Image: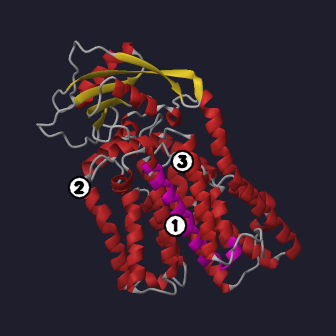
C-alpha cells in the first residue's frame, strides 16, 4: 500500500536516512540562526558541563553532561554545542524508531510513516527541538533499546546482547524515568512468544545485569542527593493529603499522556475511525506484534499509576510521558490490520489523507520555528531565546572583565551557562544551581570577580545576600553597581536592564 509520495524512497532505508538528516540539519540551522539564546534546559546543562562529576543537577544522572563535555572539547562551551548534541540525539531517536517500526510492522510504507507520526506528537515533535535536554538522550536510548530487543527474536549473538546492554545502560544514565520504560518493555517481551524464550537465557540475564551496573553505581554514590531532591520536589505532599496528591498526579499523567500523542492520535481517529473498531483475527505475526504493543501500553499505564499512588506524586511533568511513544506504532499496526481486511480503495484513500496530514505537520514544524522567531521577541516574558548575550559580553569586556569567576543570579532567565561561551577561560557560578560547584581555582590564580543579575541597581542588596548565602561570596562594600540596558534580539524597541559589579579577586571568586 503506497501512502507516501513516490519521491519518498520507502523501500530504501539509505534514501530515507538522507531525507531525515537533511530535515534535521535544516531545523538545526533554523534553531541556531533564529534564536540567539537558548531554553532554560540549554543554559542549565551548559552551566553544569564545566567539569567531570558523578553528580550535577540533583536527581539527574550525569551522562548528558558528560556527552556535552566531550562535544565542548571540539566546539567549545557554547549554545551551538548544546544544540548540536541535542539535534544529533533527536535524529538518532527518529532513526531507531524507524528501524523498530520496520520490524514491528513489516511494511516499508508504514514504517516510513512512523517518524512522521512521532513528529506529530507535540512533546516529541516540538518540545524536543526547543526545550528538552536529558529527555532527548533518554528517548534515543528508548528507541534503540526497543529495536535491539526486537532483533533478539531472530538474531541473539554476543554482539546483539552487548549492544542492547549498552543502549539500556545509556538510557538509565540519561534519565531515571527510563526505568519505567524498561519495566514495561520487559513485560511486553514476556507476552511475545518469539521474545519470551530469549528472556530466560543466561546471555540476556547477564545483559540486563551489565546494563544496570553503571546507573546503580552512580545511584549508590549519590543516594543522599537523590533523597534530598525528592523531598525538595514535594513528593507525597499536596493540599488534602495523600489521596488528593495521588488523584492530582493521575489526572496530570492522563492529560500529559493525551497531550504527548496529540495531534497524531486525534488525526488518526478522525481519518481512519474503522481501524479502532474490533478487528477480525489477523495473521499470527501481527497477533504477536499486537499483543507485544498492547502489553507494553497496558503495563506502562499500570506502572505509572502504581508509581504515582505509592509515592503520592502530585506533580507529573510532561516530558516524563515520552515513554508513550510506542503508541504510535500500535496505531499504525491497527491501520495495517484494518487495511488488510477493509475495502481497499476507501482505506487507501483515507491512509493517503493521513499521510498527507502528517507531512503537513512536518512542514509546519520549521514554519513554526520561523513564526516563533518572528513573533516571540515582541511578546516574550523571560525571553530566554532572545537575550542578547553577545552584546552583553561585549559590554562586560569593555568594562574590563577578561577572565576570572562569573557569579550569576539566574532569576528569572539564565545567565551563567550562556555566558560561558563568551568567557571560556572563566569559572561560572550560579546562586540558583548550588547543587553543583565547578572546581575551585588554584591559590595562585589571578583574575576578577563579576556578579551579574537581571534588574537595576536597586536589586543589588538582595542579589548580594543570595550570593553570600548560597556561595559565601561577599563583594566589598565600596563596589558600585553598573546598569546596562540592552535591546531584546529581534525587538529593537524592547529593552531589558541588567546590572553587574566588577571587583578584584576575593576568596574563591577569582
Q: CA distance from mark 1 to mark 2?
A: 28 Å
Residue wearing tag 1: 143
Q: CA distance from mark 3 to mark 2?
A: 28 Å
Q: Secondary structure at mark 1?
A: helix
Quadrant location of residue 13? Answer: bottom right
Q: Nearer the viewer, residue 136 or 203?
A: 136
Q: Secondary structure at mark 2?
A: helix
Residue drawn where x is 61% and y is 38% of the image: 373
Residue drawn where x is 49% and y is 31% of the image: 387
Question: Is residue 284 depicted above or below 389 in this figure?
Answer: below
Upstream in sequence: badge 1 or badge 2: 1
Q: Nearer the viewer, residue 263 or 389?
A: 389
Q: Which mark is residue 273?
A: none
Q: Is residue 112 magenta?
A: no
Residue drawn where x is 40% and y is 29% of the image: 394
Residue wearing tag 2: 221
* Count of numbered circles in the view: 3
Question: Is residue 431 depicted above or below 425 in this figure?
Answer: above
In this picture, residue 291 sits left or right of residue 503: right
Upstream in sequence: badge 1 or badge 3: 1
Quadrant location of residue 465? Answer: top left
State the extent of the magenta-drawn residues as a range.
81-110
Badge 3, how many Cα within 10 Å: few under 14, some, many 20+? some
Residue 416 x, y percent position in the rendering? 36, 35
Q: Quadrant of the C terminus?
A: top left
In this picture, residue 418 sits left or right of residue 139: left
Q: Quadrant of the N terminus?
A: bottom right
Residue wearing tag 3: 318
Q: Give the mark toward the camera: 1 or 3.
A: 1
Q: Nearer the viewer, residue 387 or 213?
A: 387
Q: Give the mark toward the camera: 1 or 2.
A: 1
Amino acid at each position: 500500500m503506497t501512502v507516501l509520495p513516490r519521491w519518498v524512497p520507502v523501500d530504501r532505508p539509505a534514501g530515507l536516512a538522507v531525507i531525515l538528516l537533511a530535515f534535521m540539519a535544516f531545523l538545526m540551522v533554523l534553531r541556531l540562526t533564529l534564536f540567539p539564546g537558548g531554553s532554560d534546559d540549554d543554559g542549565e546543562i551548559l552551566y553544569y558541563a564545566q567539569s567531570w562529576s558523578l553528580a550535577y543537577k540533583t536527581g539527574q544522572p550525569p551522562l548528558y553532561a558528560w556527552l556535552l563535555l566531550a562535544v565542548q572539547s571540539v566546539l567549545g562551551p557554547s549554545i551551538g554545542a548544546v544544540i548540536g548534541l541535542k539535534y544529533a540525539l533527536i535524529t538518532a531517536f527518529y532513526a531507531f524508531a524507524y528501524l523498530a517500526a520496520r520490524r514491528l510492522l513489516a511494511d516499508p510504507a508504514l514504517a516510513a510513516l512512523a517518524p512522521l507520526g512521532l513528529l506529530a506528537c507535540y512533546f516529541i515533535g516540538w518540545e524536543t527541538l526547543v526545550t528538552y535536554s536529558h529527555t532527548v538522550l533518554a528517548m534515543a536510548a528508548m528507541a534503540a533499546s526497543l529495536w535491539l530487543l526486537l532483533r533478539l527474536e531472530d538474531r541473539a549473538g554476543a554482539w546483539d546482547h552487548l549492544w542492547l546492554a549498552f543502549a539500556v545502560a545509556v538510557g538509565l544514565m540519561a534519565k531515571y524515568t527510563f526505568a519505567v520504560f524498561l519495566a514495561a518493555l520487559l513485560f511486553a517481551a514476556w507476552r511475545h512468544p518469539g521474545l519470551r524464550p530469549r528472556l530466560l537465557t543466561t546471555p540476556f540475564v547477564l545483559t540486563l545485569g551489565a546494563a544496570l551496573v553503571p546507573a546503580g553505581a552512580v545511584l549508590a554514590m549519590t543516594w543522599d542527593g537523590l533523597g534530598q531532591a525528592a523531598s525538595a520536589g514535594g513528593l507525597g505532599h499536596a493540599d488534602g493529603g495523600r489521596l488528593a496528591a495521588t488523584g492530582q498526579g493521575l489526572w496530570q499523567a492522563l492529560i500529559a499522556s493525551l497531550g504527548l500523542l496529540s495531534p497524531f492520535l486525534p488525526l488518526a481517529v478522525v481519518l481512519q475511525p474503522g481501524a479502532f473498531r474490533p478487528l477480525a483475527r489477523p495473521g499470527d505475526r501481527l497477533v504477536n506484534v499486537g499483543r507485544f504493543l498492547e502489553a507494553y501500553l497496558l503495563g506502562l499505564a499500570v506502572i505509572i499509576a502504581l508509581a504515582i499512588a505509592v509515592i503520592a506524586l502530585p506533580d507529573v511533568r510532561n516530558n516524563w510521558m515520552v515513554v508513550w511513544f510506542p503508541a504510535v506504532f500500535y496505531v499504525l499496526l491497527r491501520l495495517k490490520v484494518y487495511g488488510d481486511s477493509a475495502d481497499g480503495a476507501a482505506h487507501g484513500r483515507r491512509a493517503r489523507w493521513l499521510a498527507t496530514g502528517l507531512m503537513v505537520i512536518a512542514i509546519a514544524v520549521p514554519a513554526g520555528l520561523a513564526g516563533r522567531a518572528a513573533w516571540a521577541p515582541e511578546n516574550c516574558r523571560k525571553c530566554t531565546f532572545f537575550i542578547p548575550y553577545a552584546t552583553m559580553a561585549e559590554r562586560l569586556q569593555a568594562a574590563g572583565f577578561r577572565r576570572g569567576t562569573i557569579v550569576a543570579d539566574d532569576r528569572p532567565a539564565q545567565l551563567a551557562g550562556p555566558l560561558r561561551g563568551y568567557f571560556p577561560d572563566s569559572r561560572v557560578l550560579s546562586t540558583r544551581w548550588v547543587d553543583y560547584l565547578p572546581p575551585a581555582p588554584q591559590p595562585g590564580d589571578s583574575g576578577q570577580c563579576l556578579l551579574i543579575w537581571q534588574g537595576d541597581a536597586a536589586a543589588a542588596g538582595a542579589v548580594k545576600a543570595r550570593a553570600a548565602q548560597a556561595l559565601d561570596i561577599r563583594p566589598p562594600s565600596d563596589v558600585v553597581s553598573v546598569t546596562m540596558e540592552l535591546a531584546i534580539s529581534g525587538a529593537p524597541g524592547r529593552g531589558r536592564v541588567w546590572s553587574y559589579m566588577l571587583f578584584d579577586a576575593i576568596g574563591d571568586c577569582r
